[in-house]
Image: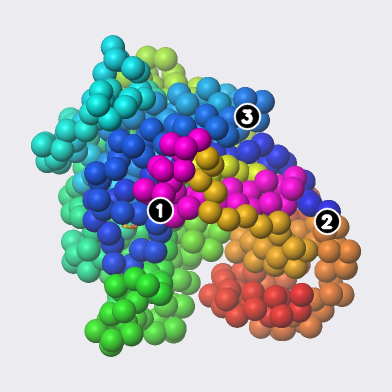
Amino acid sequence: MIVLKDNCAKAGIYIHIPFCREKCPYCNFYSVSDHSRITPFLEALLLELDLRSRPSMEVDTIYIGGGTPSILPSHTIGMIMASIKKNFNVLDGAEVTMEINPGTFSRERFFHDETNRGFFHDETNRGFFHDETNRDDVTGDGIAGELKALGEMGINRLSVGVQSFQDDKLKFLRRIHSSAKARETLKAARDVGFGNICLDLIYGLPGENTVSWRKDMDAALGFMPDHLSCYMLSYEPGTPMYDGMKRGVIKPLGEEESAALFRDTSLYLSQRGYFHYEVSNFARRSHPMEAGGKDFTGFARRNPQIEAGGKDFTGFDRRSHPMEAGGKDVTGSSHFVSRHNEKYWNISSYLGFGPSAHSYDADKVLRFWNVSDVPGYIALLRQGTLPVGGREVLTREQYLMEFIMLGLRRAKGIDVHGFSKVSGHEFKIFFDNVIKRITALSWGGFEKKYSREVFALNRDGWIFLDTVTSWFVDQL
Ligand code: SF4
């Protein structure tokens, strides 16, 4: 099969930390709230990184997600980062993202006895202690201290799971944090010098309207996030929220209300300088330091780390920030698009570590994934076995399906010539009926973007993304 090679040939690394303080009722990601295996998990994770070591593999994005990575103290993140750098060729300027959840930093500590057996240990002589006696939340300086340490470990992008700035919404979602804690965390993140912050929000809760949702968007915009991920609440089979819906206890928003909220989100954020580049994702078009060195957030300029050396955690010199020179960056859109997620959307190579993590080898068109089971993951690695739960070489149909589906989700659209190259079919002829249907509805069309001819959906098309996708897939 011909596989498209794009300018994203370098690999990404994903690390899955499968622990959460409590399980949220709408979430179907693999995570557990029993923390008793954190220490053996960390050891197993480092073993996996060693076992899959490829020092010549160039890596330009790292994403530490979960689960809730921020329940781990920063020094363990430092150990994970050191192992990644030991086992792979992490390029200068790599985007290194970590997910953090407000209210998850704690005084919980994992003590590493440097003098005794290093990081690994046997059961009788533990070099890596876990003290669960002191789990109260840290606040103020404590949060700032943890975040500062993360920056020093090489994390240069934070993805903050705020979800909402309204306590009644947070309560419905059964999130463990309050709105005040979210604000405190975001302020601390700016204060310590993070120049690339993504904020996750959830909307479309039962009964939600534009007024309520705009309150959240306005509160978020107050922090000048560099990236916003806005997810419509979905009801995933197997979750308590889904069961509640099935039992009639929870009444989801109707299709029309959901569509109106989606349209409003896209318009509202686009008018405020955000590039709606993927159905749920928005990237800020300008850098806060751009306008003559003025900092709209009022945070970064006061940061001594930036002021002293002219560098922040993103590694960019203020005077030569890519957005400052000409306002354009490589994507032609915004410097702040998630470079790591672009790997998934471009069907590029990435390696996933940790329970349930997926990997994709673009050269072999091979997808494989780890077991979704913390004890099983640990046991396999202790035996020196890779914890692979399954693998598949994508069929031509699967690959084309992904190519189409991922193209439809993005403002970049479907690369028309790329499709012809991988499928052997002329896009315009092959999908003639579907294209006519979409253009007649004014849901999208052909455009010249990034010096390529693409077929892209617009805002209205994205409202009906599932329907439109099924039209294409039926044709394959
Ligand atoms: S914190 Fe995130 S990963 Fe954990 S259960 Fe909640 S939504 Fe899922």
Residue at x 60%, y 52% (from the top left corner): 368
Mark 3 vs 2, N-terminal side: 2
Residues rendered magenta in the picture: 355-384
* Place of residue 127 in the rendered image (x, y in percent of width and height, measured from the top left): 28, 23
Q: Quadrant of residue 293?
A: top left
Residue at x 72%, y 83% (from the top left corner): 437
Measure how far apart labels 3 and 1 are at the Cα level. Answer: 25 Å
Q: Which residue is mark 2?
A: 1
Secondary structure under tag 2 reads loop
Q: Tag 2: residue type? A: Met
- Nearest the viewer among 54 and 400 is 54
> Is label 3 in contact with label 1 (beta carbons under 8 Å)?
no
Mark 3, ligand 1, within 8 Å: the answer is no
Q: Is residue 440 visible?
A: yes
Q: Quadrant of the N terminus?
A: bottom right
Measure how far apart labels 3 and 2 are at the Cα level. Answer: 25 Å
Say above or below: 378 vs 112.
Answer: below
Question: Residue 311 got which mark?
Answer: none
Mark 2 vs 1, N-terminal side: 2
Secondary structure under tag 1 reads loop
- Nearest the viewer among 368 and 207 is 368
Q: Tag 1: residue type? A: Asp
Question: Residue 54 got which mark?
Answer: 3
381 falls in the magenta region: yes
Mark 3 vs 1, N-terminal side: 3
